[in-house]
Image (cartoon, rainbow, N blue to C red):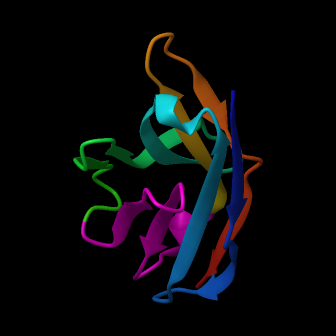
Amino acid sequence: QVQLVESGGGLVQAGGSLRLSCAASGTIFSINAMGWYRQAPGKQRELVACIFSGGSTYYAHSVKGRFTISRDNAKNTAFLQMNSLKPEDTAVYYCNARTRAPISDYWGQGTQVAVSS
């Protein structure tokens, strides 16, 4: 089992920055990838960015060049640095951890990000 605790959401003006953190505990050795998803009202949850255990990363096209995902293995924490925020980035952001065999997904409680125009 993996437990995830998120922090760092809030309200910011367009063009501003926020940094999300996701602290993992439990069977962290089994984690293969950590990522951030978001869900806006009336929309499906979508993958924003993820980072694999080897360090490779993936970004959704809509955030590429503005968001940066990183991972501090010593602290078992993943970060999402969000710059040049836009109103369309407004959503609840969820941290995700995916484990190796058996493949399982674990989720944080979600943190609200609101960007005003």
Residue 50 image point, x, y percent: 38, 46
Say whether residue 39 is visible: no
Residue drawn at point x = 52 percent, y = 86 percent: 14
Q: Position of residue 10 (x, y in %)?
A: 71, 77
Asked if residue 113 shows in the view, the reply is yes
Please identify the quarter of the rendering in which residue 2 is found: top right
* Quadrant in the picture for the N terminus: top right
Q: Is residue 3 magenta?
A: no
Q: Residue at x 24, y 70 (%)?
A: 65
Residue 58 is left or right of residue 9, and the answer is left
In the picture, measured across the screen, residue 89 lies left or right of residue 49, that is right
For this rendering, which residue is in front, 116 or 8?
8
Q: Nearer the viewer, residue 60 or 96?
A: 96
Q: Count every numbered label the image shows and give the total.
A: 0
77 and 79: which is toward the camera = 77
Q: Residue at x 50, y 89 (%)?
A: 16
Query: Is-magenta flag for residue 75?
Result: yes
Q: Is residue 13 above or below residue 55?
A: below
Note whether 106 is above or below 80 in the view shown: above
Measuring 49% from the left and 34% from the top, which residue is drawn there? 29
Residue 107 in the image: above or below residue 85:
above
The C terminus: image quadrant: bottom right
Q: Position of residue 46 (x, y in %)?
A: 50, 40
Residue with the most extreme top position: 102
- Range of residues picked out in magenta: 65-90
